[in-house]
Image (cartoon, rainbow, N blue to C red):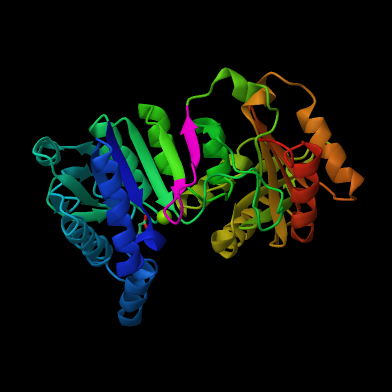
Amino acid sequence: MLIVQKYGGTSVANVERIKAVAQRVSKTVKEGNNVVVVVSAMAGETDKLIGLANQLSPQPNERELDLLLSSGERVTTALTAIAIESLGHKAIALTGRQMGIITDKVHTKAKISEINAYKAKDAIQKGYVVVVAGFQGITDEDEVTTLGRGGSDLSAVAIAAALKADLCEIYTDVDGVYTTDPNIVPEAKKLEKISYEEMLELASLGAKVLQTRSVEFAMKYNVPVIVRSSFNDNAGTLVTKEDKDMEDIKVSGVAYDKNQSKITILGVPDKPGIAAKLFNAIASANIVVDMIVQNISNDGKETDISFTVPKTDSKKALEITQSIAQQTGAKKATLAEDIAKISIVGVGMRTHSGVAAKMFDVLSSHGINIMMISTSEIKVSCIISAKYTELAVRSLHESFNLDFQK
Ligand code: ASP
Ligand code: MG
């Protein structure tokens, strides 16, 4: 088999951890596999480099920032290759450029456009373990780019797709994907497998084991991904195509997200074009809107619109909304930061009815008020007051029988 193994920051945090990575790679090779290793920077290193740049400038040039940040992964790539060689294997370290990872020109959040993996393929054929720097690429004008925070996951999945690897293992410091956050619900169970779609909903909802874009990529190219711990030999969670027995389970996981704020614009004149104006202005400021709810106007004259944005953008979004309120004759705009989004996710929802109703029942039986609701085919999300987050997660987890699920 050809296996891509990606090791995150905590898995290469120091020399001892890098030795452990080399041991695991060595074992995998001895079992008869070809291995391509993708590494992140040592834990905390990327933040440290950003901190240094920020001491010199409040807004460092993004081109230079990318060059700076890419150095973190270079360090671990070379060290890991050295460690693997010292165990008697042939190993070669490659930068993103040497791996042929071509990206667009958007510094700090570049997208991969193609991978010219001939150098890696050649090395694999000659019996080398190839160790690649994650998180980085190169434009067709030879500029170094990075793929956005957590981007090494994407590097690994994209490399697995380009090399047609049999498996992409993502090694991290947790055992896999859980039915919910074990810090809130100690009974949370590790899932044996989960579909790409469910994983996407959970990842974008704040169950951050895998970077969202890497899951999208894995789904598009059908790369089987296993999330597992580099600190033990436990089996991990397989992220794969949906299958029949996944459908039997109504809810696979309960997620929460406390990083959103709610903005409400009150007394908006009920006429065409206002929502377009508002959300165009928000989008122009590069703010990503998640949920939107517009109330029915009771007198046909005015209505209220609420929407959620990431907490980091809430002040900016409020200012924009206030100015749109003024321009359009709306009454006012308000901001609520003490909210949380609670979601239940499961492909089984496609074939089972009453799942949303049960969620609302559970919340109401605990006196939790629902401020906004949104649904997709495989997800129901509710905005509630942040102070009820733990209670909501715990009671939903129990009510949907996840405490007992295997
Ligand atoms: N080192 C980068 C970061 O901290 C990329 C990664 O770890 O995936 O975001
Ligand atoms: Mg990571």
Query: Is residue 257 part of the magenta span, yes or no?
Result: no
Q: Is residue 123 above or below residue 267?
A: above
- Between 81 and 107, the one lying in front of the other is 81
- The region drawn magenta spans 228-240
> In the rendered image, which quarter is residue 111 located in?
top left
> In the rendered image, which quarter is residue 2 located in?
top left
Query: What residue lies at 79% left-to-right and 42% top-to-bottom?
Result: 398
Q: Is residue 298 above or below residue 232?
A: above
Residue 42 % position (x, y): 33, 65
Q: Does the rendering let one see residue 211? A: no
The quadrant of the rendering that contains the C terminus is top right
- Between 272 and 178, the one lying in front of the other is 178
Residue 130 % position (x, y): 18, 46
- Between 232 and 122, the one lying in front of the other is 232
Q: Does the rendering let one see residue 53? A: yes
Query: Is residue 238 part of the magenta span, yes or no?
Result: yes
The quadrant of the rendering that contains the N terminus is top left
Residue 215 % position (x, y): 44, 38
Q: Where in the image, quadrant-wise, is ligand 2 located?
A: bottom left
Residue 226 % position (x, y): 44, 39
Q: Is residue 388 above or below residue 300?
A: below
